[in-house]
């Protein structure tokens, strides 16, 4: 029956378009305390678009747009493509023919948090503001004071600022805008009522992360997060005895998905993320964890209910079996006195009929409980104490009463037809 409960849990997940790699993952989901969610593509739509170029003093918007476009020509992300499109549509800039130039593109990495191009003696970079500020300093330049003010203004609005620099010179800021998926706040409220803490993971600066976290309704956030920061957060939660679930879709999320007790990879994510997680959400809906947790809790409640019933059922059956074991001392049917005669509370006909009735009842009750194991106990949000009381009253008390009635009926039948 335990195997049937696990398989049934995995089947219910499939009905919600979630593939689980093991029944243990489903069971762990029922006890999750903390949920970590990657922001981009998980909480937000994930297709951040460039909406504005904000140049620094002494820099024209056209110069900023041209540099931003050059640094994004090899960037295939939605953000990179939107920068090229904005430069083309707003400033009539066309992508350059670079075959006659010595251009070396610098890819984005989670460590450097910036990308760009080296061309014609220029080193153009775009990326996280602090990373670009550090790059400017290494080139002998100084970050302008107005850049910090611009970054804070964009961040407070919930946008993402990308800084652009040409060697030691800060050119300006690209304003990227993302949209929080609909219904997120309500879903996170539901997770909170289930006792699950939600933490948003993002590479954005703390001001942007604060605005997005407030709009989405998460409990906490980790800003400017690198892959090792995600791992450290998960391990810290696990050290405190908590079970952690992680949802993500990127290659950078793969180590955290593997470390988490429940790793839910988005179907739209990378192959590395899918292989690292122990579940894949085919709908790529991060709040699907609500259904996953409910199914996990249903699995645990079903297992607890059937375990309670089984223990009570075994206790009741012993009132038929134990007296029969001492049949050489007292005949169950005929004994009128003695300590063991009092145990024959069912008044079974003979020791043979008592043993046979218990065996037949045991075989029948297992078959009868399999549909309950497959269907599962209906999930209701309640505390562990309430679940225990309910199990004791319904399945504990029922597990004692049903064997008494069932074994007695079987004893009457097999006695009547002369089997014992």
Image: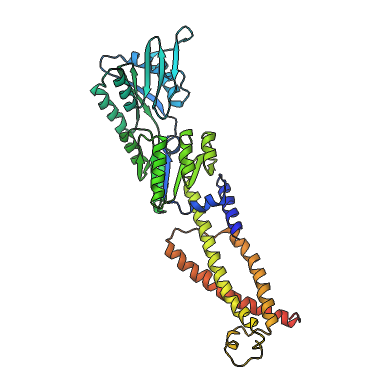
Work out whether residue 28 or residue 75 is closer to the camera in this orientation and state it.
Answer: 28
Write the residue at 66% across / 91% down. 334
Provide residue 419's location: percent of width, then percent of height. Answer: 75, 79
Location of residue 144 by image quarter: top left
Provide residue 131's location: percent of width, then percent of height. Answer: 34, 26
Work out whether residue 242 or residue 18 is closer to the camera in this orientation and state it.
Answer: 242
- Toward the left, the furthest residue is 145
Query: Can residue 183 be seen?
Result: no
Q: Is residue 413 above or below residue 214?
A: below
- Toward the bottom, the furthest residue is 336
Location of residue 135 by image quarter: top left
Is 77 placed left or right of 346 in the picture? left
Provide residue 362's location: percent of width, then percent of height. Answer: 65, 71
Q: How many marks?
A: 0
Colour convention:
rainbow
Location of residue 328 by image quarter: bottom right
Work out whether residue 386 or residue 322 is closer to the camera in this orientation and state it.
Answer: 322
Provide residue 33's location: percent of width, then percent of height. Answer: 42, 51
Q: Is residue 307 above or below residue 232?
A: below
Query: Can residue 37 be seen?
Result: yes
Write the residue at 68% across / 82% down. 351
Q: Is residue 94 above or below residue 276?
A: above
Q: Quadrant of the C terminus?
A: bottom right
Write the residue at 55% across / 70% down. 311
- Toward the top, the furthest residue is 100
Is 308 placed left or right of 241 in the picture? right
Write the residue at 47% across / 6% down. 100
Q: Quadrant of the N terminus?
A: bottom right
């Amino acid at each position: 029956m335990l195997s049937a409960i696990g398989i049934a849990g995995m089947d219910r997940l499939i009905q919600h378009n979630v593939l689980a790699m093991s029944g243990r993952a489903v069971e762990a989901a029922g006890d999750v305390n903390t949920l970590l969610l990657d922001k981009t593509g998980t909480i937000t739509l994930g297709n951040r678009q460039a909406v504005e170029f904000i140049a620094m003093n002494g820099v024209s918007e056209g110069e900023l747009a041209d540099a931003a476009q050059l640094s994004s020509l090899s960037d295939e992300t939605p953000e990179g493509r939107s920068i090229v499109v904005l430069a083309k549509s707003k400033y009539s800039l066309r992508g350059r023919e670079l075959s006659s130039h010595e251009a070396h593109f610098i890819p984005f990495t989670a460590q450097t948090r910036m990308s760009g191009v080296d061309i014609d003696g220029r080193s153009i970079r775009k990326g996280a503001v602090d990373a670009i500020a550090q790059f400017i300093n290494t080139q002998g330049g100084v970050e302008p004071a107005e850049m910090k003010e611009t970054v804070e203004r964009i961040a407070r609005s919930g946008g993402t600022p990308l800084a652009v620099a040409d060697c030691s010179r800060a050119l300006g800021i690209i304003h990227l805008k993302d949209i929080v998926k609909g219904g997120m706040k309500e879903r996170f409220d539901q997770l909170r009522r289930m006792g699950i803490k939600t933490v948003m993971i993002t590479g954005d600066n703390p001001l942007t992360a604060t605005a997005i976290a407030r709009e989405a309704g998460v409990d906490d956030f980790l800003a400017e997060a690198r892959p090792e920061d995600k791992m450290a957060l998960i391990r810290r939660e696990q050290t405190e005895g908590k079970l952690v679930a992680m949802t993500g879709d990127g290659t950078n999320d793969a180590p955290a998905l593997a470390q988490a007790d429940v790793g839910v990879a988005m179907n739209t994510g990378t192959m590395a993320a899918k292989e690292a997680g122990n579940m894949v959400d085919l709908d790529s809906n991060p709040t699907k964890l609500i259904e996953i947790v409910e199914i996990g809790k249903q699995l645990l409640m079903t297992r607890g209910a059937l375990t309670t019933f089984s223990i009570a059922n075994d206790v009741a059956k012993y009132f038929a079996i134990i007296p029969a074991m001492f049949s050489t001392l007292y005949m169950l049917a005929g004994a009128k006195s003695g300590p063991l005669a009092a145990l024959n509370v069912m008044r079974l006909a003979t020791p043979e009929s008592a043993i046979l009735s218990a065996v037949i009842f045991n075989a029948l009750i297992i078959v009868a409980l399999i549909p309950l194991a497959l269907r599962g106990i209906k999930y209701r949000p309640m505390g562990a104490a309430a679940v225990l009381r309910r199990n004791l009253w319904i399945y504990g008390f029922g597990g004692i009463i049903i064997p008494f009635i069932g074994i007695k009926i079987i004893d009457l039948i097999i006695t009547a037809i002369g089997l014992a």
